[in-house]
Image (cartoon, grey):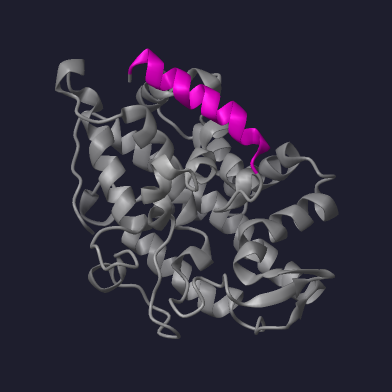
Amino acid sequence: MGGSGLLWIGRALVLLQLVNGVLGWGKEGHYAICKIAEGYLTKDALAAVKELLPDSAEGDLANVCSWPDEIRHYYHWRWSSPLHYVDTPDFKCNYDYCRDCHDSAGHKDRCVTGAIYNYSMQLSAYQDSVSDVKYNLTEALMFLSHFIGDVHQPLHVGFTGDEGGNTIIVRWFRRKTNLHHVWDTMIIDSALKTFYGSDLTVMIQSIQKNITDGWANDISSWESCRYNLTICPNGYASESVCLACKFAYRNATPGTTLGDDYFLSRLPVVEKRLAQSGIRLAATLNRIFASQIKIAEA
C-alpha cells in the first residue's frame, strides 16, 4: 500500500476515536479476538501481518480490528456495510450461502461470509511481487480480521425479519436497547464490570486460560477446515445461527427485561465465540501466508 494511503488510514483511525456507535462485537470484542489470534500466529504469518499493518497499529493487529466498524458509515465506505452480517429466513435456524449471501438489493456474495472469501483471496496475493498485486492488502487484512469476528457473533447471522435482532427492543437491566446491541457490546461490558474489574486485559487472559485448559481438546477442530481448504466461514455462520436460536432469541421477545438469568447463561456463549474467533482467525492467516494456497467455497 502506498504511503499516502497508510497515512490516510492512520489519520482516519485517530479522528474516528471520537465517533460513537461502534458496531460489530464492539471495540472490546474485536480487540480481544485479534489479541487472542496474535498468540497463535506462525512466524511467517506474524511477519506478513506486521508488514501489512498501517503505522497507526503500532505493530499490533488488535489495534485496528475495529477499523471496518469505524469507517462503515462514512460515504466513501458505505458499500461495506452489508459485509458485516448475513440475514437468514425467520425461524428456520439454518444458513445457506446460495440462499442467504446477498445484500438488500439482491446482489450476490455481498454478506459477511462472501466478504471473508473475497478478502482471503486478496491476501493470497501477498506472495506475488509488488507490481502484480492488484489489491490493497492492508485493508484486506483489517477487513478479514474483523469479519471473521463478526461471523461468530450469533446475531450477525440472525433473522431477516428483525434485522439480526436490531428491531427487537428490550431492556438490558435498566437500560433500553435492542437485542443485537446486547450481543454486540452489552454482555461484554457487563462482564468486564462484574467479573474483570473493568480491565479488558484481565478478561482476555481469562479466555486464553480457558483455551489452554478447558477447551484444549477442541482447538484442533476449531482450527481445521474440511477438504484442507484455507477458509471455511460457512461452518462458522451455521454455528452462529444455531446459537442465535438457542440462546440469543430465546426469552428475549420485544419489551422483555433481560437481567441476571439471561446475562449469566449467555456470557459463556459469548466468551467461547470470542475464543473460537481468535483461534480461527489465526489459523486462517497461518494458512493464507503459508506457501500453498487453496481457497474455495466450503
Q: Quadrant of residue 62?
A: top right
Above/below status of 281 relative to 163: above
Camera sees residue 168: yes
Closer-to-camera residue (298/221): 298
Camera sees residue 223: no
Q: Quadrant of residue 298?
A: bottom left
260 relative position to 38: left or right: right
Q: Residue at image x 35%, y 73%?
A: 95
Percent position (x, y) of residue 221? 40, 55
58 relative position to 228: left or right: right
Q: Residue at image x 33%, y 64%?
A: 103
274 relative position to 126: left or right: right
Q: Quadrant of residue 46?
A: top left
Residue interval drawn in magenta: 2-19
Percent position (x, y) of residue 296? 18, 51
Q: Residue at image x 44%, y 67%?
A: 157
- Image quarter in which the N terminus is found: top left
268 relative position to 159: left or right: right
Q: Look at the magenta stretch and give its main secondary structure.
A: helix
Q: Residue at image x 35%, y 63%?
A: 235
Q: State yes or no: residue 7 in magenta.
A: yes
